[in-house]
Amino acid sequence: MITAIPEQNQTAAKEYVQSVYELVIKRNPYESEFHQAVKEILDSLVPVFAKHPKYKEHGILERIVEPERMVSFRVPWVDDNGKVQVNRGFRVQFNSAIGPYKGGLRFHPSVNASIIKFLGFEQILKNSLTGQPIGGGKGGSDFDPKGKSDNEIMRFTQSFMTELSKYIGPDVDVPAGDIGVGGREIGYMFGQYKRLRGGYEAGVLTGKGIIYGGSLARTEATGYGCVYFANEMLTAKGLGFEGSTVVVSGSGNVSIYAIEKAHQLGAKVVACSDSNGYVYDPNGINLETVKRLKEVERKRIKEYVAEHPGAVYTEGCDGIWSIPCDIALPCATQNEINEESAKLLVANGVKAISEGANMPSTLEAIDVFLNNQVLFGPAKAANAGGVAVSALEMAQNGMRLQWTFEEVDAKLHSIMKNIYANSVRAADEYGYSGNLVVGANIAGFLRVADAMIAQGVV
Ligand code: NDP
């Protein structure tokens, strides 16, 4: 039920939230991505603080923006030429109020403390939204897997895990994959962890291979989940994927399975990309080609056009958003849709955006979508399917059994429906009907905040 919140409570809540945001900037200078994530979340929590003073009294906001623990460590390794290389590793253990820290590892040259903290902070609320018992964490390294041999990847990941293993465990912190970390990297890291521990703790990592404790449908989960979420938004408006034109950025794990599910639901995906450029195929992207190029041959997306003469490759990533589409699924990386791209999408008649990547739309771009009544599924909700199935992988590991693909997919589908329904409900209850950014943040926050209150000042 919507209850009117007195004006002075709103003003006080705004001032309070702003003061915490300023504290974050002061305490974490130069961390622009972290500031951006904190701002997006804190601004949307104003109605919660206006309505429930108890959260301020318990210092929930001051505590939630400060990680419980953050480690940064040296990762030395030897390349194929016998040269010593040094990278930096990170793990942020942000919040464990509702379960062990949980979140992926990213290997990309852009990784730094700010990126890891923005991802870890978002992860707290995302994990809460799934309804699963998992806290928030994230990690990674500035290591660039591109162009490295298999042996170099193995030596790097073993060195990385040798240090990381001191801080993780099935009931403590459970990492998974993210950009640059797929099944191969998880496999090498699990092997090294097992060797160091001298025991088979299957639940320490998720995204494992099916033959050694992985869950069926984990590989597909984030991409499928992103499409399931978009479908919920569309269905509520009497729309759907059938017969629609879709643009998906990226061609990695999330993108590939978003394309697969969109095709299964009767849509035509006409474009995808990598960090060098994008491919437009008016006949519909051939997913088998993308899968082989990216998952097997580890080649660049531009190779696609050699096999599909009707397709066009364009250097640079931004232009992908100038392609007219009904549904856009940004599945590559943060801040890939800026205000200008958002305006182009709107001008070309886009009806829905569902974020497969983390924070792919800038704050200005989100405003453009919301102000133009475009259905907008924020990352925290729309891409939560991956971590949700990771939690299901942990559950299967704990029970030492394996569910079928159909069982996991059905659970994923119902989790995505619940995330949508809970986000809609929270938005309605706090006077922001139709705004899923606010709804998802509030629904995720309340569960964590209540657990924090119950557990005292820790
Ligand atoms: P992958 O490494 O499998 O794929 C990433 C894709 O994005 C690649 O096509 C990559 O191109 C492209 N890309 C990376 N950096 C940039 C850039 N700076 N500009 C343009 N394109 C870029 O990663 P995932 O698919 O796993 O992750 C994609 C996004 O989804 C990330 O934001 C991640 O945090 C998020 N996510 C992933 C989950 C998962 O389960 N995997 C779960 C929830 C969120 P190239 O090959 O050239 O590097």
Image (spheres, rainbow, N blue to C red):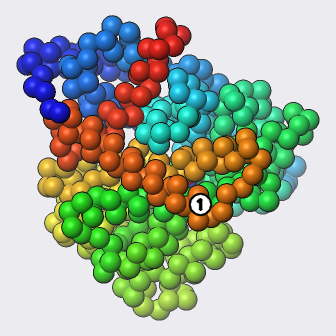
Confirm whether residue 372 shows in the render. yes
| Circle 1 residue | 407
Confirm whether residue 94 shows in the render. no
Report the amino acid beneath label 1. Glu
User: In the shown orientation, is residue 332 left or right of residue 78?
Assistant: left
Q: Note whether 19 is above or below 364 in the view shown.
A: above
User: In the shown orientation, is residue 379 left or right of residue 342?
Assistant: right
Q: Which quadrant does the N terminus fall into?
A: top left
- Where is residue 141? Give x, y as percent: 64, 40
Residue at the spot x=13%, y=27% of the render? 3
Q: Note whether 244 is above or below 283 in the view shown.
A: above
- Where is residue 201? Give x, y as percent: 80, 39
- Closer to the camera in the image, 70 or 370: 370
Q: Note whether 66 is above or below 364 in the view shown.
A: above
- Closer to the camera in the image, 90 or 419: 419
**Secondary structure of the residue carrying numbered label 1:** helix
- Closer to the camera in the image, 121 or 85: 121
Residue at the spot x=73%, y=31% of the render? 169
Picture quadrant of residue 440: top left
User: In the shown orientation, is residue 402 left or right of residue 51?
Assistant: right
